[in-house]
Image: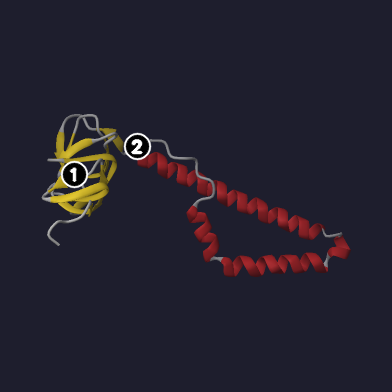
Amino acid sequence: MQFPEPTLTQEFLAGFLEVWRLWVPLLLLLIWVGWATRRWWGGRLLLLSLVVLIVFAAKVTLRERTRERATMDAWNKLRVPLPQVARIDGLQLAAGTMVRWNKEREGHLLTAELGTGQEVSPGMVLVGEVDHLWDEGWRGTLAKESVLRGWTCAAGKVDIHNSGELSWCVLAGRLSGI
């Protein structure tokens, strides 16, 4: 799975917003100095200062892009095909399923890419990527409306315990007798 090339990172923007108390006064001071000295140097100081700010911002942005790209490459290196059929953290996974292993907890997964659908538990066919969100369970996408443990679940988001049992789903249709 290829991720789109990042433009400005959210981290950079968040960092910029965190230090607005520094940037805004400096920018206002820069504009004032440029305005005050416009007669002496013909506004060249203001122009030079703006160029320096643009170069600095570009340098920081490029550094952030490089760091984010390295993070994405490291994340994708954790992605490997499962060599054989296995039951891991409550999910029955077919051989060849692309998985990301959790480096902090050996033998556990972070994600599994199920493609167009895999039966991970009796009657539970999931599609796309499932995420191990917390210690006790997974979140995935149910391929079609299914009856799971007596509940009619709509296609879409579903939570599964590590035991393989249904934890949560969006109910489909109307319940009878209510």
The CA span between labels 2 and 1 is 35 Å
Q: Nearer the viewer, residue 125 or 170?
A: 170
- Residue tagged by mark 1? 146
Quadrant in which the C terminus appears: bottom left
On residue 77, the disc is 2
Query: Mark 2, residues whose alpha carbon is within 10 Å: few (<14), some, or many (≥20)?
Result: few
Secondary element under disc 1, as helix, strand or loop, is: strand
Q: Position of residue 69 (x, y in %)?
A: 46, 42
Residue depicted at 20% across the width and 49% down the height: 153
Q: Give, as a three-letter code, the residue at label 1.
A: Ser
**Whole-percent x, y for residue 113 in the image:** 28, 38
**Measured from the top left, where is residue 171 in percent x and y?**
22, 53
Q: Is residue 43 left or right of residue 74?
A: right
Q: Quadrant of residue 114?
A: top left
Q: Position of residue 1 (x, y in %)?
A: 38, 35
Q: Is residue 104 visible?
A: no
Q: How many marks?
A: 2
